């Protein structure tokens, strides 16, 4: 085989190109800190890195969702704590008004305080988060949920509950709508209510009530009517007598699986209605209290009627506080679930980042050695080619 000058030049240029390519790749590795920057350089590792990157991005999105939900639930938790405080203050005011020692001026002052707390309670129910969303509006988060009205407050939100995904296969509610928290409150003892007829003329006062036999209670409506000052009959909704007996103040009247305690002295013809509990807004409960106190302070004081109204209000406030406590417990449970998911997510992301690093991060000592070798080889090749070009017979003729 004849070795010509052109062949030598072609071989040298090919070798030089390979050395420069290797040098450029090594320099790129050193500057980026990555073992490869394109799938072609390491297809298998690049495929694994792409899979890990997708899993990492997904996990980071779950964490972002969890952080957002945590912030929203913390805001809700703080608001619910305020609601509990406001309801407890209202309960204390109701007990004060029911002490039997309040003058009409005192009752008017209590009514004013209760009305102020009513406004504050509505303000709390309209709490917004850091993004300006109303946390108790359901899906209608840009709509103010509550507006004060003559009956308490009207609700403009919906019954939706926003959820976000905080882990694979795990979603969590980021809040609770105002209808659930403030409107769906059972009246009375949570099962049935007891109310005095408006035309009662005696001093009969409503006391404790309870279901004593759930199997016997059918959820019907009844009326306790006094046929004499010391005798009563219990009638069902068809006016059939289901029970009767002698009235003893403070002694429970039992019938159809329930018992109702009355005190004081009802008059002949007085009656007390027993009906299944219904849902009532806590704002309506407070407004009824304010109206009763204003009425008692403005006209002839009927202490018995006022006491029975306040007794019902206290039961309704207790139900509202119990409902808020239930929601608070749910919020706390969700916050615990988020904390657990965040911990798992952090661990998972660390592992994924380590796996990506193991595949893609550059071994700097080896890369520097390779870079030095490539630079040396390139320099030697250039010098060698220069010397070879000088080897010609014409130099010796």
Image (cartoon, rainbow, N blue to C red):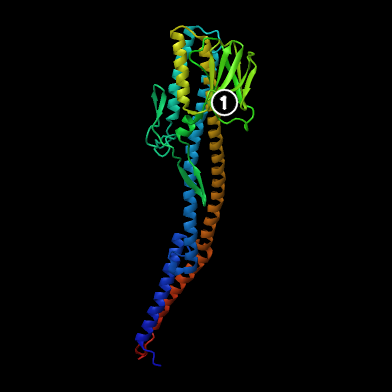
Q: Is residue 290 visible?
A: yes
Quadrant of the frame with the C terminus: bottom left
Which residue lies most toward the bottom here?
1
In terms of secondary structure, where does tag 1 sit? loop
Picture layout, residue 88 above or below residue 326: above
Picture layout, residue 229 above or below residue 115: above
Q: Choose top left, top right, bottom left or bottom right for residue 314.
A: top right
At x 37%, y 86%, the residue is 7
Q: Choose top left, top right, bottom left or bottom right for residue 392.
A: bottom left
Q: Residues within 10 Å of mark 1 (few under 14, many from 20)?
A: many
Left or right, 149 with respect to 103, comes to left
Q: Is residue 382 visible?
A: no
At x 59%, y 18%, the residue is 233
Left or right, 41 with respect to 273, comes to left
Q: Choose top left, top right, bottom left or bottom right for residue 311.
A: top right
Q: Position of residue 246 (x, y in %)?
A: 64, 14
Q: Position of residue 143 (x, y in %)?
A: 37, 34
Picture layout, residue 216 above or below residue 304: below
Q: Which residue is mark 1?
A: 189
Left or right, 133 with respect to 239, comes to left
Picture layout, residue 62 above or below residue 31: above
């Amino acid at each position: 085989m004849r070795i010509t000058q052109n062949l030598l030049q072609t071989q040298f240029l090919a070798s030089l190109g390979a050395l420069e390519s290797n040098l450029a790749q090594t320099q790129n590795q050193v500057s980026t800190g990555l073992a490869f920057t394109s799938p072609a350089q390491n297809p298998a590792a690049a495929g694994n890195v792409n899979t890990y990157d997708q899993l990492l991005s997904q996990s980071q999105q779950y964490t972002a969702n969890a952080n957002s939900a945590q912030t929203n639930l913390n805001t809700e938790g703080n608001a619910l704590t305020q609601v509990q405080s406001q309801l407890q203050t209202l309960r204390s005011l109701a007990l004060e008004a029911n002490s039997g020692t309040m003058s009409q001026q005192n009752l008017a002052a209590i009514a004013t305080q209760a009305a102020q707390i009513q406004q504050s309670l509505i303000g709390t129910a309209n709490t917004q988060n850091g993004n300006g969303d109303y946390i108790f509006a359901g899906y209608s988060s840009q709509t103010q949920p509550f507006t004060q009205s003559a009956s308490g407050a009207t609700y403009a939100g919906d019954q939706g509950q926003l959820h976000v995904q905080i882990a694979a296969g795990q979603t969590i509610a980021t809040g609770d709508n105002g209808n659930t928290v403030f409107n769906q409150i059972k009246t009375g003892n949570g099962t049935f209510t007891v109310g005095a007829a408006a035309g009662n003329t005696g001093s009969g006062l409503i006391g404790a009530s309870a279901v004593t036999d759930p199997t016997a209670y059918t959820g019907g409506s009844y009326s306790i009517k006094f046929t004499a000052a010391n005798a009563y009959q219990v009638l069902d909704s068809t006016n059939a007598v289901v029970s009767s007996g002698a009235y003893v103040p403070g002694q429970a009247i039992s019938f159809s699986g329930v018992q109702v305690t009355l005190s004081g002295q009802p008059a002949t013809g007085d009656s007390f209605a027993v009906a299944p509990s219904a849902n009532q807004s806590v704002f309506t409960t407070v407004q009824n209290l304010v109206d009763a106190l204003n009425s008692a302070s403005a006209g002839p004081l009927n202490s018995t009627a006022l006491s029975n109204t306040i007794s019902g209000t206290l039961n309704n406030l207790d139900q509202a506080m119990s409902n808020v406590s239930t929601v608070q417990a749910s919020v706390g449970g969700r916050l615990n679930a988020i904390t657990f998911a965040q911990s798992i997510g952090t661990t998972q992301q660390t592992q994924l980042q380590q796996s990506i690093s193991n595949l893609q991060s550059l071994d700097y000592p080896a890369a520097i050695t390779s870079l030095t070798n490539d630079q040396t080889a390139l320099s030697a090749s250039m010098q060698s080619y220069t010397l070879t070009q000088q080897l010609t017979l014409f130099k010796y003729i």
